[in-house]
């Protein structure tokens, strides 16, 4: 596949995420998909994770800020927003607007995503949900 076709797969995956269309992911992600950061080893596990995510943050929306393709990989810098309306990993809902940023890399094979790596600021995300409180020293360092 061309670099542009690979980027289009990732863009369609984000569109499906923003519509919460888990069924469309069957067309875009391989059944044996590997999500390295969360250690998922199947599309089924990933869809289960997304269903829980959408319960916790039902108005989730992610935007691709930058996208680059090389070989069989696509890199994207993304920003996300949403409102915490449901439990997330044992944390009670806050009703607060939350935001997140990440850089992700997807490997594409035969028109489907087969692997993903990502780096995001989970510390800040969990702080927004009230799962982490900074010490007084940290509050000075990270206002």
Image (tube, rainbow, N blue to C red):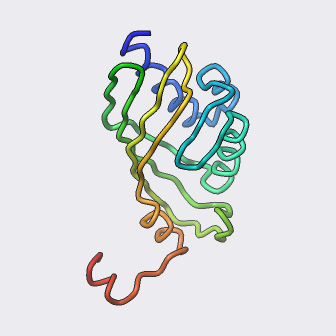
Q: Give the residue displayed 58% in from the left and 61% down from the top.
A: 84
- Extreme residue toward the top, this view: 1
Residue 37's x, y, as percent? 52, 48
Query: In this rendering, would 73 be left or right of 89?
Result: left
Q: Name the one closer to the observer, 56 or 76.
A: 76
Q: Give the residue displayed 60% in from the left and 26% down from the top.
A: 29
Q: Vertical placement of 119 versus 138: above or below?
A: above
Q: Give the residue displayed 59% in from the left and 36% down from the top.
A: 34
Residue 62's x, y, as percent? 46, 42
* Quadrant of res 78: top left
Query: In this rendering, would 24 be left or right of 120?
Result: right
Q: Name the one closer to the observer, 71 or 13.
A: 71
Work out which quarter of the rendered image holds the C terminus and state it: bottom left
Q: Name the one closer to the observer, 64 or 38.
A: 38
Q: Vertical placement of 128 versus 30: above or below?
A: below
Query: In this rendering, would 101 be left or right of 22?
Result: left
User: How many discs mark residues in the rendered view?
Assistant: 0
Q: Give the residue displayed 58% in from the left and 30% down from the top.
A: 16
Work out which quarter of the rendered image holds the N terminus and state it: top left
């Amino acid at each position: 596949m061309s670099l542009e076709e690979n980027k289009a797969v990732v863009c369609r995956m984000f569109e499906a995420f923003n519509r919460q269309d888990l069924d469309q992911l069957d067309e875009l992600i391989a059944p044996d998909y590997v999500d390295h950061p969360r250690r998922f080893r199947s599309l089924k596990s990933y869809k289960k994770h997304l269903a829980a995510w959408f319960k916790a943050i039902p108005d989730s929306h992610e935007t691709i800020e930058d996208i680059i393709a090389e070989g069989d990989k696509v890199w994207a810098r993304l920003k996300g927003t949403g409102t915490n309306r449901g439990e997330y990993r044992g944390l009670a809902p806050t009703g607060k607007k939350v935001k997140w940023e990440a850089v992700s890399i997807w490997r594409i094979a035969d028109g489907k995503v087969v692997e993903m790596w990502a780096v995001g600021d989970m510390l800040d995300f969990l702080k927004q949900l009230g799962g982490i409180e900074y010490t007084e020293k940290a509050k000075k360092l990270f206002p």
